Every structure is written in structure tokens, then in C-alpha cells.
DNA sequence: ACCCCCTAGGTAAGCGCTTTCCCGGCAGGC
DNA sequence: GCCTGCCGGGAAAGCGCTTACCTAGGGGGT
């Protein structure tokens, strides 16, 4: 492990000179020296210790990202946007998966704080639980008070900037579309109860129901895990609990795909006998049969905007909140109920 | 930004004592003091500076992961396995996306080296280009010489441990299956030319062709970008260049899905008029219509094994190389050629 | 010819921790 | 009652860098 001092000794100069050269600081250095030092760096294969650099400079370079799970396409797409912007700014990104565990999320905030990251981006961490939210908020504020920036994707109930996807309006869009088509018996495949993404989207659906003179009864809503198999199981439950069902709204596309598989298995034609609508507009939605009607959220763009906020200089104008609009995308999985 | 010294002052003890307490070092400390210090830590909301800790301790904690793109389902699944193991070991994971750019990959190796990560896991970085491979190898060796561990997913041509997916045998499996069904005019949608994943899988396909008394001509192989749209475009090219084609092998499932979309668009029945086989067995493969025949690679398990290797203590027995077997999965997208 | 100032490089003081070494005091053994 | 040994705690030396400050020359202006 060659150090700066080794290089300095080798080149016969002081460590200050070496430091200046490798950081190409504005201070002028004679070409001869520069060459000699660079040669020494190469010979010794010197790689500066980033920890020492950060400590000495007191600057913050990397940015931390906490998501539920990068392997979930929803977060994968957001992450892609986050990464792109960070990379453009020459920032290293540290990605942490919380796996929807609030405690793990809290631990990661501490960790990223301890590592002096320049910013923390939280994606998808809207918890219904108030104590959790308060603790998270406390940690984030502390982090901010030491100079860190925070940017949240989801409900804006934390310190820091936010880009909030229109989940409630999106839910409304889905419900409204179904009711307009003439459906009256609608089943909902919801996500985990403790996430605001679930409660918000569901609230939108309920608003649409009300507006059309209906309501969603307890057995019309089944909670699942935001993944394909959860969706398939929930669809089965829904079918069993609601004999006259003509439409299903899933709160994300993964679950909708699972529901579709369940329906196919039972020989229920979509959209002939059952309409199905998803949420998010994942890339795969267009490739299933029939292609999935859904509510589109500009995920990658959300990531881009969140990282842009996280990297902006100065927050003199206080926290910024941006909204990302939901848009209805009608494809082949929805239609009017049969006669 | 409260520091250790602040806490010490506040509690009226030396920094050494505070350090011992927060790290609960084996050295005994009187309970009264401990309480006082802990109280001070809480009041000041002290969060230790991880950079300073790493510098002082000279230990390595985080582990770095370099993948092409986490938002690609292939890498998402591998990453999930990597993460799980790392988390179980209490390690922070730093994920870096190289976007298949060798230069960026090299830069990331330096970066992770500089940050004193305990290990670097490289996923998917098999480049056909020899100079690139050599440079990568040089950097990895240097990193190893300073105590870092390296673990590679893919061809084993680097220093360090490796888990190598059986790409060539997998390609053979796909080709063999097609020829056995009676196909003779087979088109191939390959990945980027500069990746060994492409060349290895293609080599397997060629071996199968040869064994069955055929060969793959230049216009039977089209290179694309390992993504859906690349696959769709390649399928169109293949169709145009090979009038009598009865089967297509795509070198990954994303491209196969794209090809499927292309065929559907043109009203070509799968598998009636055209058989299609993919590679990887992505989660979505079972949800398209018809479900995709493919070659399964245990991706998450590959991730698990790679991280396990990366985290193992001591390498007294030299680098370890493990293989991950490919397995043929026949579903609905393949059949015998029509009459 | 003198002075001043600018330039190139070195010296050394940190950055926030950890840890070795040392010291004072107490208990126990003889 | 004195010495030994142990225990709790502090002082201080780093870890590998950066950078403010200082110094020694050398060139130009008058």
C-alpha cells in the first residue's frame, strides 16, 4: 500500500508537492518536478486513500440512495434516473436496499450520515406508522444540520426536497376509467398496508367509486406484497369473495401480471369476462397478453428530478416539492363488462 | 457536527474513553462513566465520522459491486443475491453501474480501491478486447496486493475468485433443443460483440449446429444490444435476411421478448410458424404469450455464491472457481417446424 | 545596484478517530 | 506494613491526506 509519503520520498519532493500535483491544484509546479512525481506515482502504482482525502478535505462526495429493492422494476427504473444524473455530476452512488424494512432504513440513514455522503435520496419510504416517520424525520434533520442534503421520492412529510408521484390522482384515474366503462363490481389488489403508496392509490380509487355512486367494501380489497405472486394469490381471493366481479384494479403492474396469470389459468378471458388495470406502466406491461391497461408514472424522470434536487446548490429558498403526474394508459386489458 | 472530542468534553472524560465505549471495546469501563458518556452521545446526537474511523482502524468494511446496469433484470437478480449475503454479514454494499463501458468499469475499480472497500465483485465484465482485459486485470491485482478481495461473475480470466455461468454449454442446450425438434434454418439474435457472454453463448450454439451437421452463416446471426428493442429490431432483420427461417434463438430473454413482439406484430404464429428460445429465464418469461422456452441460469444463486466467495477469509488455497449450471427450460414458444 | 514582489516548494498543523503505552490507586499476599 | 499486580482511565502518537503559512530565490523596475 503505497502512500503519498512513499511517492514523495521516491520523487525526492515533499508530500505537499505530490498532493498538489495529483489533485492538480491551481498552485504552479515546475514541469520537471511534475514529471518526476508522476513517474513515481506510476511506478509505485499509487492510489490515494479516499478516506484520508475526505477527512482532510472535509468535503462530501458520494451520494446515498435508499430504495426498497433495486431488483424490483419500479425501483430499478427510478434508480436508473438517479444514477444517470449522479454520474453526470461525477458523483459516486451508494445504493442501499431496505427491503421495505423501516428499521433497516433508519440504520442506513445513520450509515450514510456517518460516511459523510453529500446527499441522501429516499425512494419509496412512505410509512403509515407515525413513530417510524418521526424517527426517520429526526435522523434526516440531524443529517441536514450537518450539511447533508436530502431528497425524498414519495409523500412529502420529511425535511428536504421531494418529488411526489401523484398516487392518489393516479388511483382515481384507474377507478374512474373502470366505472366509466360500466363496471360496478370492482375488486382491488392493494399493496402492503404500511406503505403510503398503497393508502394513497387506494384513496384515489375510493374517491372514484364515491363519485360514481359506489363504494369499495372490505371484501373487495385484498392486500398483497406488490409482487407478481402476491398479485396472483390476491386475484384468487378476490374471485372467491366476489362472485359478480367484472373488473380488477391492481395497485402496481407486477401484481397485475400475477392476476393476469391467475385469470388465464382459470380460463377467464381478459378483457371479455374481466377487465384488469395496473399501475406504474412497467416495461413488461406491453408484452403480456393482452397488453396491460395501466396508470403511467414517469419513473426514470422521477429519479432524474430527485437526484437533481439532491445535488442542487444551496437551499436558500427552503425545500422544493415537485409533482410527477400520473397518466392513464388504456391498452387491451380493459373493456366494457359483458352484456 | 458533534465530534468525539465534543462528547468527551461534555462528559468530562478523555476521548479514549468515549471511543472505547461507543465501540464497546473489551477494555472495562466503570458503569457510571459509561452512562454519562452515553448520555452525552445522545444529547449531542453524535454520529461518528466513518472516514476517520476507517482511517484510524485501517480496516475495510464496505464491499463494492460493479455491474452493467442494475435496472436490467439479469443484473437485478444477481444483485439481489449479492446484497442478501452482504447484508447478512453486516456489510454495506456500494453498487456501481458501468453501463457496459469498460473505461467506466476501470474507473470504478480505482474508486472502490481508493475507498478501501473490503472486496470488489465484478458482474458481467467479460470483454473480448485483450488490452481492456489486461488493464482490468492489472488494477485488480494491485487492489488484491493491498489486501482487497476480488470475485468475478463470468469468465475466469482475472485474478481472484470466480463463479462462472455455463454460457457455452447453455448455448449448446438451446441449439441442440432446436435442432432436435427438426429445425434446420435457425436465426440467432446475439448480444453486443465485445462481451464474452455473447461469444460464449454463440459458441455453444455453433457447436450444436456443427454436431447436427449444420452451420450458422453470417446472415443468420444478428447482433443487438441485449435489450427488448434491440431484440425486436434484430428479429426483423433476421426475417428479412433469411426467408425460410423456422426458429430463432435469442441470447437473452429480454431480446426474445422483443422478438416475440415483432413476430406478433407481423402475425407470425409462435411456435406454429416460428419457434423461439431465449436465455436466462427472467421472471417475465413465464408471463408472455406463449411462455418462453429458455435456458435457465440460477442468477440469484450466482450472486449469493459470488458474494460468499468475496467475503471468505483467507485465500490460502488460491483462487476458487465455481460453475453455475445452465438448464434447458422448455415452455410454449418452441415446437417442431410446420410440415 | 538595491529593493520588492512574485514564484516554487517545503513545513507543519490539522481532519476525527483508535490504540498503545503509561500512571495512579486500590486490594491482596506475605 | 510493604510490595506486587491489576484495573480504570488519560496522554499522545499516529492513520494518509490537504492546505495555510513560510521561506528562499530570481527577475524587473528605478
Image (spheres, coloured by chain):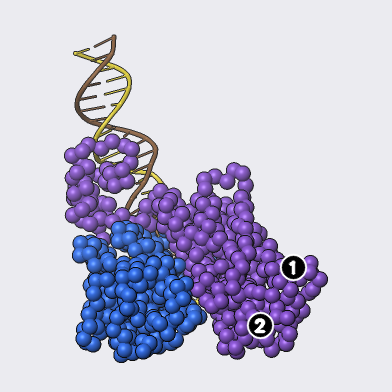
Chain colours: A blue, B purple, C brown, D yellow
Whole-percent x, y for residue A295 in the image:
37, 83
Visible residue check, residue A86? no
Label annotation for residue B154: none
Whole-percent x, y for residue A240 in the image:
34, 70
Q: Secondary structure at mark 2?
A: loop
Whole-percent x, y for residue A118 in the image:
35, 68
Residue where numbered disc 2 is placed: B273
Q: Quadrant of the N terminus of chain B?
A: bottom left
Residue nearest the observer in this picture, B193 or C11: B193
- Chain ID at mark 2: B
Q: Nearer the viewer, mark 1 or mark 2?
A: 2
Whole-percent x, y for residue A33 in the image:
55, 66
Q: Secondary structure at mark 1?
A: helix
Visible residue check, residue A115? yes
The residue lying at 75 percent from left, 76 percent from top is B184
The span from disc 1 to disc 2 (Cα, nearest Å) is 22 Å
In the rendered structure, the answer to whether residue A114 lies left or right of residue B325 reads left
Q: Quadrant of the C terminus of chain B?
A: bottom right
* Quadrant of residue A246 within the rendered picture: bottom left
Residue nearest the observer in this picture, B12 or A203: A203
Residue nearest the observer in this picture, A74 or B292: B292
Residue nearest the observer in this picture, B299 or A270: A270
Same-chain status of marks 1 and 2:
yes
Residue where numbered disc 1 is placed: B208
The residue lying at 24 percent from left, 77 percent from top is A216
The residue lying at 69 percent from left, 68 percent from top is B177
- Chain ID at mark 1: B
Amino acid at each position: 500500500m503505497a502512500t503519498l509519503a512513499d511517492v514523495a520520498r521516491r520523487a525526492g519532493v515533499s508530500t505537499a508537492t505530490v498532493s498538489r500535483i495529483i489533485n492538480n491544484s491551481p498552485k504552479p509546479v515546475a514541469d520537471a518536478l511534475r514529471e518526476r512525481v508522476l513517474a513515481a506515482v506510476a511506478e509505485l502504482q499509487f492510489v490515494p486513500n479516499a478516506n484520508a482525502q475526505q477527512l482532510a478535505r472535509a468535503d462530501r462526495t458520494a451520494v446515498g440512495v435508499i430504495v426498497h429493492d433495486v431488483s424490483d422494476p419500479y425501483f430499478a427504473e427510478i434508480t436508473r434516473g438517479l444514477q444517470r444524473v449522479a454520474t453526470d455530476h461525477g458523483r459516486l452512488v451508494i445504493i442501499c436496499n431496505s427491503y421495505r424494512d423501516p428499521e433497516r432504513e433508519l440504520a442506513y440513514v445513520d450509515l450514510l450520515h456517518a460516511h459523510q455522503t453529500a446527499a441522501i435520496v429516499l425512494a419509496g419510504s412512505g410509512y403509515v406508522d407515525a413513530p417510524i416517520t418521526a424517527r426517520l424525520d429526526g435522523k434526516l434533520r440531524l443529517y441536514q444540520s450537518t450539511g447533508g442534503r436530502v431528497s425524498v421520492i414519495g409523500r412529502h412529510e420529511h425535511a428536504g426536497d421531494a418529488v411526489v408521484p401523484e398516487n392518489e390522482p393516479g388511483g382515481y384515474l384507474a377507478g374512474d376509467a373502470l366505472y366509466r366503462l360500466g363496471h360496478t363490481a370492482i375488486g382491488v389488489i392493494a399493496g402492503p398496508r404500511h406503505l403510503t403508496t398503497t393508502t394513497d392509490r387506494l384513496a384515489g380509487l375510493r374517491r372514484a367509486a364515491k363519485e360514481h355512486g359506489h363504494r369499495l367494501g372490505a371484501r373487495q380489497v385484498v392486500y398483497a406484497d406488490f409482487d407478481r405472486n402476491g398479485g396472483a394469490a390476491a386475484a384468487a381471493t378476490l374471485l372467491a369473495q366476489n362472485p359478480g366481479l367484472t373488473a380488477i384494479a391492481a395497485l402496481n403492474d407486477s401484481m397485475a401480471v400475477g392476476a393476469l396469470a391467475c385469470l388465464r389459468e382459470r380460463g377467464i378471458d381478459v378483457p371479455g369476462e374481466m377487465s384488469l388495470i395496473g399501475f406504474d406502466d412497467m416495461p413488461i406491461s406491453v408484452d403480456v397478453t393482452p397488453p396491460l391497461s395501466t396508470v403511467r408514472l414517469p419513473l426514470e424522470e422521477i429519479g432524474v428530478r430527485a437526484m437533481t434536487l439532491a445535488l442542487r446548490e444551496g437551499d436558500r429558498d427552503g425545500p422544493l416539492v415537485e409533482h410527477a403526474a400520473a397518466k392513464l394508459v388504456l391498452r387491451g386489458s380493459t373493456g366494457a363488462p359483458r352484456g
